[in-house]
């Protein structure tokens, strides 16, 4: 891709993310599951160690991009190992949290507030590794972003994605209900004041996804414009067709090293139920150029 000219809808989603995280940056850093849950943290750390060991260069020679890295869930783990990390995110508020953490720990990553597509379009530094953690479901155009990431890698470089939802309509009716109950209990326990707002956002986003965008100009679309969260979590309700995405990425030129689909929930009992049902709620990919 030689010229990145995102459509109006893509730009709209980008702005929604910027506005949404301006409101919730501190709450996100304090309470988001993938940032604070011990199991998620262990999985992420184990995966990163395994991936780093796959790369040819010593850690102090590696160049890693934490794409949409926010408050540093990935970056801090890499910086601890002496890796050269560039963090790019649209949210200045999340990046300020990262800067504060790095200042206390005496880390010095390159921190850039920019839309990731625009960054990848002009940055051809040749990264050894690009990580998208809980990021893909925020993109209106996932395929274009990952295609540009391919051009920003060194030969044999890797792209790793984690903490993104699978296509939810492929799960059982019971499994979808279990996931909703898991989310409701998380909200009651951690963010009781946001219960109504959270389910309103999911309702609006679900309506829009379900009708494939035909609601533009309708009351739902007007409401979405007022509620940044429903737009920012663009694929959170519907999920991502990761099987089709992996096939597309092979066509781009990637070799798919990992494509893991798994059941995940905030509470152990719900994770157990989802596994018993055979449903898959999340996926991760490891891609090689």
Image (cartoon, rainbow, N blue to C red):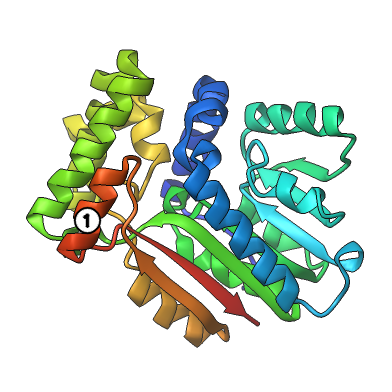
- Residue 208 vertical placement versus 141 (above, below): above
* Direction from residue 194 to residue 30 in the image, left or right: right
- Residue 7 vertical placement versus 126 (above, below): above
Residue 153 in view: no
Circle 1 — which element? helix
Kindly give the residue lying farthest to the top in the view shown. 193
- Measured as percent of width and height from the top left, residue 136 is found at 47, 55
Badge 1 crowding class, 10 Å Cα cut-off, few under 14, some 14 to 19, many 20 or more, is many
- Residue 57 vertical placement versus 215 (above, below): below
Q: Residue at x 40, y 29 (%)?
A: 228
Task: Give the residue pinned by disc 1.
Answer: 274
- Measured as percent of width and height from the top left, residue 211 is found at 16, 51
In front of the other: 132 or 262: 262
Residue 177 occupies quadrant? top left
Residue 112 occupies quadrant? top right
* Direction from residue 31 to residue 202 in the image, left or right: left
Q: Residue at x 69, y 64 (%)?
A: 49
Q: Residue at x 72, y 27 (%)?
A: 96
In front of the other: 39 or 220: 39
- Residue 137 vertical placement versus 61 (above, below): above
Q: Quadrant of the N terminus?
A: bottom right
How many callouts does the rendering have? 1
């Amino acid at each position: 891709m030689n010229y990145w000219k995102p459509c109006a809808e893509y730009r709209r989603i980008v702005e929604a993310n910027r506005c949404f995280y301006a409101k919730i940056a501190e709450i996100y850093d304090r309470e988001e599951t993938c940032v604070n849950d011990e199991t998620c943290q262990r999985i992420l750390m184990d995966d990163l160690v395994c991936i780093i060991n796959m790369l040819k260069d010593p850690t102090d020679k590696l160049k890693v991009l934490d794409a949409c890295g926010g408050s540093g869930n990935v970056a801090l783990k890499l910086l601890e190992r002496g890796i050269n990390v560039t963090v790019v995110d649209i949210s200045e508020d999340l990046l300020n949290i990262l800067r504060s953490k790095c200042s206390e720990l005496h880390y010095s990553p390159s921190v850039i507030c920019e839309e990731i597509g625009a960054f990848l379009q002009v940055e051809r530094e040749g990264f050894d590794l690009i990580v998208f953690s809980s990021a893909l479901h925020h993109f209106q155009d996932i395929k274009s972003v990952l295609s540009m990431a391919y051009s920003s890698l060194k030969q044999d470089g890797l792209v790793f994605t984690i903490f993104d939802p699978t296509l939810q309509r492929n799960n059982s009716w019971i499994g979808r209900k279990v996931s909703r109950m898991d989310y409701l209990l998380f909200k009651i326990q951690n963010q009781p004041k946001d219960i109504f707002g959270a389910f309103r956002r999911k309702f609006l986003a679900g309506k829009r996804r379900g009708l494939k965008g035909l609601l533009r100009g309708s009351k739902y679309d007007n409401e979405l414009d007022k509620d940044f969260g429903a737009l920012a979590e663009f694929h959170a309700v519907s999920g991502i067709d990761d099987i089709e995405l992996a096939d597309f990425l092979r066509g781009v030129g990637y070799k798919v090293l990992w494509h893991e689909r798994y059941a995940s929930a905030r509470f152990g009992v719900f994770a157990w139920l989802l596994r018993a049902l055979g449903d898959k709620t999340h996926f991760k990919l490891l891609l090689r150029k």
